[in-house]
Amino acid sequence: MLNVLPDSADRAAIQEAREQIAYIGRMLFDRKLTDAAGGNLSVRVGDWLCMSPTKAGQARQWQLHAEDVLVCDLQRKIWVGQGGLTREANVHFGLHQAYGEYGRAVIHAHPQNLMVFAVMNQAMPPVQEGTLKFGITPVTEYTPAHSTLLGKRIVDSMRGREALIKKHAAATLAAWHGVFTMGTVLYDVFDAVERLDNNAYFLLMSGAYRASHHMQDELTAFEVARQHAGEDEA
């Protein structure tokens, strides 16, 4: 099927990206990092975008094969694959066009714990060592799903976090909707989504154990412990 692409296309890299998208899509669904209602993934390979098709969850329960994954040009023409463009194509194309020199993979998902912060329209602070690098995960003003304006607001929300995209990944919560994450490679973006969802779980569970608000007291204690550990190593 990839023989329909121009000779300039890196067909081996494109096929690898399609296989990764099918695999990571199943992983997201199996680990409750997205649901049947939505989610979409994309990887840029040169001037081509590999992307999960529309309704990958609703119609296929994320049981995708590499051959199902779309291969599009940057003008949104589908050259290869099964199905139509994802309904959040505005966000994917916008992010790749704005930040393609920093990262080449995007995941939109509905993680079970992060969704609590999305529906509360609330930014999420990092509360564990493994998520400090991401800083506060911001939340955008409510914007209807699938809209051009949502694409613009998600793109704008990443501005100033280019170094984070290049190093690992950066994420933004869309109010009452889900999370959009962009990073270097798809496996890193998947890792970031899971770390952030775990971070959300820890915050939610901390309330059951009467932790301080957003675990501020516990984070202060953590910072003191880190400083002491650094002094001991010195």
Image: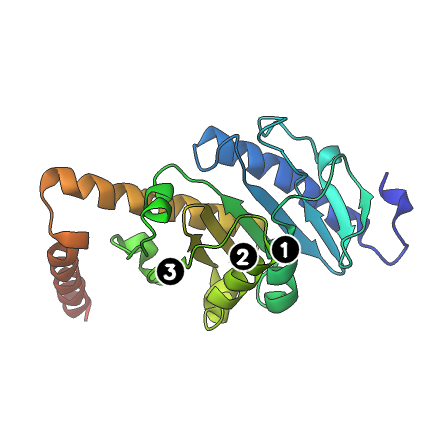
Helix, strand or loop at label 3? It is loop
Is any part of residue 155 visible from this angle?
yes
Label 2 with label 3: CB-CB less than 8 Å: no
Could you give the CA–CA distance between mark 1 and mark 3, rounded to whole angstroms? Answer: 20 Å
The residue depicted at 33 percent of the width and 42 percent of the height is 116
Colour treatment of the image: rainbow
Place residue 63 in its image quadrant. Answer: top right
Depth check: 139 or 112 in front?
Answer: 139
Left or right: 45, with 77 as reference point: left
The residue depicted at 57 percent of the width and 36 percent of the height is 25
Give the x, y percent position of residue 128: 26, 52
N-term mark: 2 or 1: 1
Give the x, y percent position of residue 105: 59, 54
Label 1 with label 3: CB-CB less than 8 Å: no
Q: Which residue is mark 3?
A: 138
Q: Amino acid at mark 3?
A: Pro
Q: State which mark lies toward you, 1 or 3.
A: 1
Left or right: 78, with 222 as reference point: right
Give the x, y percent position of residue 79: 83, 46
Q: Which residue is mark 2?
A: 150
N-term mark: 2 or 3: 3
Disc number placed over residue 153 in the picture, else none: none
167 to 56, vertically: above or below: below
Mark 2 Cα-neighbour bin, 10 Å: few <14, some 14–19, many ≥20: many
Mark 3 Cα-neighbour bin, 10 Å: few <14, some 14–19, many ≥20: many
Q: Amino acid at mark 2?
A: Leu
Disc number placed over residue 90 in the picture, else none: 1
